[in-house]
Image (tube, coloured by chain):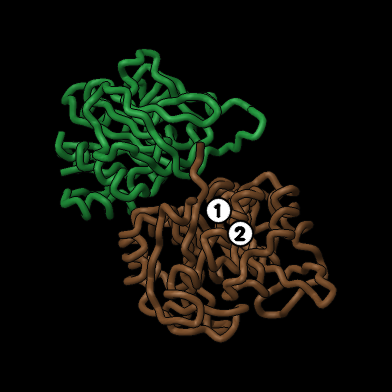
C-alpha cells in the first residue's frame, strides 16, 4: 500500500520564504534553506518549492537557491515557478529535483506538458491548477497574472492529464492560507474525473482536514500555514508531526 | 572511492549529496580512466531501458564496467532503472541488459485500482538474504517505476515490496547489488542502506 503523502509547500519570493493568504499579502517566514533543513529532519514525505516571484517579468529562475535547497533534502522534491521550457526543466532535474510543476507556462503553451512528459516521463510533470469560485460558486481556472479564465478546472484537468501530466496540484485560492479546510466538493469532482494522482492544496489547518481529503480520494495534501505557523494568527514555528498527519 | 557512473541518465547529484552526508567520497564521471580506479561503482538510472543501455554502449563504458564487476569483483549498486539494467533485459525494450543477475524487468500488470507508475513511499520486507540493510524495523522507501523485477533464484532477493503484486525492492548476487527505490530520496532509511553499501 502506498502511503498517502503530506507535502509541505515552501513559497519563495525574492530568495525569502513567505506565506500568503488567498495568494496575497506575503508574510516573511524565514530562510528557505533553513526551513528545508528542518523539514528534512522531520522526514517529510516530499517537499514542494514554489517561487511566486516578484512580478518582474525579467526575473529568472533562481538556480543557485534551488541548488542549495536540494543539497539539504533527502526526499522527493518538486519545483514550480517560471518554468516555460524543456531546457530549464533539464537544468532543474540535474540539481536533484524529480518533479517540475508548471502552471502559467502550461496555460500559455499546453504542449509544454507533452514535451516535458516525453523527455522526462509523466511522473516528473505536475500541472498546478489554481481555482477560484465566482459569486455563484462556479469554479474557474485562475491565472496568476490575469485573473480568472472562463473555463472549468475539471475540463482543464482532463486536458492536462491527456497531454501527459503525471500529477495535478489543485489549489483553492479562496481557501489558501485560511485554515478552514480544503475545497472538498471540487476535490471530489476532480478525483472522479482524472486518473492521475491529485495533490489537494489550500486550506488545511487541522489534521482532520487532511484526513477528509484522503478519505475522498486525494493521494496527497500540500500544507503551508499549518506547518510554518504555530497556529492561526500566531508566530512562525516550523513543525511536522508525521504520525498525526498520516492519521 | 565510490564512482557514480555518469551516462547521461539519472539523479547522480542527489546520490552524491547523500554520500557526502554519510562521509563517503564519491565522484560523478564517465571517464573510463577514473572508472578503472573505482573501489565501488554506483549505477544510477531514470528513464527507459533501451536508451539507457545505448548510452552505456555509446560512451564506451560497457567493457570497463564488465571488467570491474565480473573480473575484479568490485561491488556495484544499481539504483532504479540502474538496477533493472543489471538483469538480462526488460519488457520495456529490445536490448539485452548487463546480464549480471538472472532477472528480467516486467511491466506491472493492469489491475483495477492499481496506479502505474508505482510512485511514492512504500514499505519493504527484508527476506533475510544478502548483506545490505536498512537499520529501521519498518523500513520504507521512495519508489518511482512502471517496470519491476523478480529474481529467478529467490536467494538473490534481499527485500521485497508489494504493489498489486510482490516484486523485489533490493537484489544481490555476489558483488552485484540493486535497489528499485531511490535511497538518495528516502531519508534515514536510504541513508542506512547506502551506509551499509559503503561499509562492504
Q: Residue A224 location, x and y as percent?
A: 50, 69
Residue B57 showing in the rendered view: no
Categorize mark 1 by other alpha carbons within 10 Å: few (<14), some (14-19), many (20+): many
Categorize mark 2 by other alpha carbons within 10 Å: few (<14), some (14-19), many (20+): many
Drawn side of residue B170 relative to residue A119, left or right: left
Q: Mark 2 — residue? A: A200
Q: Residue at x 37, y 16 (%)?
A: B102
The chain that hosts pointer 2 is A
Q: Quadrant of residue A57?
A: bottom right
Please report contact status of discs 2 and 1: CB closer than 8 Å, yes or no. yes
Q: Residue at x 32, y 71 (%)?
A: A34
Judging by colour alone, the chain drawn in brown in this rendered image is A
Residue B40 showing in the rendered view: yes
Judging by colour alone, the chain drawn in green in this rendered image is B
Q: Mark 1 — residue? A: A220
The chain that hosts pointer 1 is A
Amino acid at each position: 500500500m502506498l502511503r498517502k503523502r503530506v507535502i509541505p509547500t515552501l513559497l519563495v519570493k525574492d530568495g525569502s520564504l513567505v506565506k500568503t493568504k488567498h495568494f496575497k499579502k506575503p508574510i516573511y517566514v524565514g530562510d528557505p534553506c533553513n526551513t528545508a533543513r528542518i523539514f528534512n529532519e522531520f522526514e517529510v514525505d516530499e517537499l514542494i518549492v514554489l517561487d511566486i516571484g516578484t512580478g518582474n517579468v525579467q526575473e529568472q529562475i533562481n538556480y543557485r537557491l534551488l541548488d542549495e535547497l536540494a543539497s539539504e533534502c533527502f526526499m522527493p522534491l518538486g519545483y514550480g515557478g517560471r518554468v516555460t521550457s524543456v531546457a530549464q526543466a533539464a537544468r532543474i532535474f540535474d540539481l536533484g529535483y524529480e518533479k517540475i510543476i508548471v502552471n502559467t507556462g502550461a496555460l500559455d503553451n499546453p504542449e509544454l506538458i507533452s514535451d516535458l512528459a516525453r523527455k522526462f516521463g509523466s511522473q516528473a510533470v505536475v500541472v498546478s491548477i489554481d481555482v477560484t469560485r465566482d459569486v455563484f460558486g462556479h469554479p474557474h481556472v485562475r491565472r496568476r497574472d490575469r485573473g480568472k479564465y472562463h473555463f472549468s478546472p475539471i475540463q482543464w484537468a482532463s486536458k492536462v492529464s491527456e497531454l501527459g501530466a503525471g500529477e495535478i496540484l489543485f489549489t483553492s485560492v479562496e481557501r489558501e492560507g485560511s485554515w478552514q479546510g480544503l475545497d472538498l466538493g471540487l476535490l471530489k469532482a476532480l478525483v472522479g474525473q482524472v486518473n492521475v494522482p491529485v495533490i489537494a492544496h489550500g486550506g488545511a489547518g487541522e489534521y482532520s482536514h487532511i484526513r477528509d481529503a484522503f478519505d475522498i480520494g486525494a493521494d496527497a495534501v500540500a500544507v503551508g500555514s499549518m506547518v510554518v505557523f504555530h497556529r492561526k494568527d500566531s508566530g512562525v514555528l516550523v513543525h511536522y508531526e508525521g504520525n498525526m498527519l498520516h492519521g | 572511492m565510490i564512482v557514480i557512473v555518469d551516462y547521461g541518465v539519472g539523479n547522480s547529484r542527489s546520490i552524491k549529496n547523500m554520500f557526502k552526508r554519510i562521509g563517503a567520497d564519491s565522484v560523478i564521471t564517465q571517464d573510463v580512466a577514473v572508472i578503472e580506479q573505482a573501489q565501488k561503482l554506483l549505477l544510477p538510472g531514470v528513464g527507459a531501458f533501451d536508451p539507457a543501455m545505448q548510452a552505456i554502449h555509446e560512451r564506451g563504458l560497457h567493457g570497463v564496467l564488465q571488467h570491474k564487476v565480473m573480473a575484479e569483483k568490485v561491488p556495484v549498486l544499481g539504483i532504479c532503472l540502474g538496477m533493472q539494467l543489471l538483469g538480462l533485459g526488460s519488457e520495456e525494450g529490445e536490448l539485452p541488459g548487463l546480464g549480471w543477475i538472472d532477472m528480467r524487468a516486467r511491466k506491472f500488470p493492469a489491475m483495477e485500482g492499481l496506479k502505474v507508475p508505482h510512485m511514492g513511499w512504500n514499505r519493504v520486507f527484508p527476506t533475510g538474504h544478502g548483506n545490505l540493510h536498512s537499520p529501521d524495523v519498518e523500513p520504507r522507501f521512495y519508489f518511482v517505476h512502471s517496470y519491476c523485477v523478480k529474481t529467478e533464484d529467490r536467494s538473490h532477493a534481499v527485500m521485497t515490496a508489494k504493489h498489486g503484486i510482490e516484486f523485489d525492492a533490493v537484489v544481490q548476487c555476489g558483488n552485484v547489488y540493486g535497489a528499485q527505490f531511490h535511497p538518495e530520496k528516502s531519508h534515514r532509511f536510504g541513508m542506512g542502506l547506502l551506509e551499509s553499501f559503503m561499509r562492504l
